[in-house]
Image: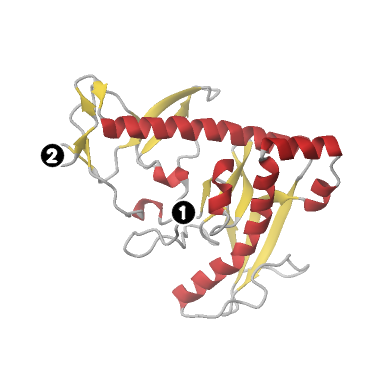
């Protein structure tokens, strides 16, 4: 099961093994994602996500997927507080669907099965809402299943969007070095971004395809969101006691210089 990140023990949900399982509401407790520095985004999320997170593209197995950056270093999520709350208005759907997930199975990943993370501490046999009533899902489980179904539809639509970007050779390598006030440097590697010069050079026919599909808006949400890197630098500054961001929060690496920390954003 690929791309499950913080799902520690995903197992297929079924009405036999889980007939007595109950779930307690997860009220702004996201400690499970505290060490996740990026999550996959669906294109439909770009408008809201771009207001708070840098949106870039990363390799996920053999696929390229859009992701929201949550941290600039490995095992760092700048949006989860020490108490486990999410410090942003918009929480990505990838995170909100937890502890449920529609996982790919089979050698080619063509089959999908609803799974739960049995390590989720909100599951209990005593307290909470049951997942099943007899052989049927309860309203709380049905709500989760509906969410997974809509998530999958949007994920597939986003795959077509990325394919269109690739077919038009619009993705380029994004390598940036971030300088912190305390002198630390972080090299962002393994990331891709839309090449705006190539985008503007598209034929009228190709550009109209992006416009009519609504994907042109997604592209510009992505491009504008990269400026949010500065906000992430500020968050790191607050955590380390340096209140002021670096003068140049994100820039291309200089030849001959080596960063102290290279974060890996493959998901």
- What residue would you read off at disc 2? 126
* Image quadrant where residue 7 sits: top left
Q: Position of residue 221 (x, y in %)?
A: 64, 52
Q: Residues within 10 Å of mark 1 (few under 14, many from 20)?
A: some
Can residue 1 be seen from the camera position used here?
A: no
Q: Which mark is drawn over residue 110?
A: none
Please identify the quadrant where the C terminus is shown.
top right
| Furthest-left residue in this view | 126
Label 1 sits on a secondary structure element that is loop
- Position of 226 with respect to 171 (left or right) is left
Relative height, residue 263 to residue 247 (above, below): above
Q: Residues within 10 Å of mark 2 (few under 14, many from 20)?
A: few
Which colour style is shown?
secondary structure
- Residue depicted at x 40% and y 52%: 33
- What residue would you read off at disc 1? 90
Relative height, residue 218 to residue 76 (above, below): above
- Position of 63 with respect to 98 (left or right) is right
Can residue 236 be seen from the camera position used here?
A: yes
Q: CA distance from mark 1 to mark 2?
A: 32 Å
Of badges 1 and 2, nearer the viewer stands 1
Q: Position of residue 243 (x, y in %)?
A: 51, 80
Q: Position of residue 154 (x, y in %)?
A: 54, 34
Q: Position of residue 96 (x, y in %)?
A: 40, 45
- Residue depicted at x 46% and y 59%: 77
């Amino acid at each position: 099961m690929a791309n499950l990140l913080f799902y520690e023990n995903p197992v297929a949900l079924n009405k036999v093994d889980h007939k007595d399982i109950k779930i307690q509401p997860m009220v702004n407790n996201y400690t499970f994602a505290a060490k996740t520095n990026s999550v996959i985004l669906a294109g439909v999320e770009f408008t809201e996500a771009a207001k708070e997170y840098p949106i870039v593209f990363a390799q996920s197995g053999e696929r390229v997927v859009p992701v929201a950056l949550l941290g600039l270093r490995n095992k760092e999520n700048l949006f989860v507080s020490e108490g486990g709350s999410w410090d942003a208005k918009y929480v990505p759907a990838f995170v909100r669907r937890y502890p449920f997930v529609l996982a790919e199975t089979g050698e080619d990943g063509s089959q999908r099965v609803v799974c739960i993370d049995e390590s989720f501490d909100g599951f209990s046999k005593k307290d909470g809402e049951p997942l099943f009533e007899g052989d049927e899902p309860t309203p709380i489980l049905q709500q989760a299943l509906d969410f997974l179904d809509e998530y999958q539809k949007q994920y597939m639509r986003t795959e077509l969007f990325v394919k269109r970007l690739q077919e038009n050779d619009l993705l380029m390598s994004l390598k940036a070095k971030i300088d912190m006030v305390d002198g630390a440097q972080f090299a962002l590697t393994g990331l891709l971004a839309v090449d705006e010069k190539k985008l503007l050079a598209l034929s009228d026919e190709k550009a109209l395809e992006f416009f009519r599909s609504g994907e042109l808006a997604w592209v510009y949400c992505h491009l504008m969101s990269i400026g949010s890197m500065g906000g992430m630098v500020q968050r790191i500054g607050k955590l380390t006691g340096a209140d002021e961001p670096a003068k140049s929060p994100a820039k291309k690496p200089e030849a001959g210089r080596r960063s102290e920390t290279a974060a890996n954003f493959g998901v």
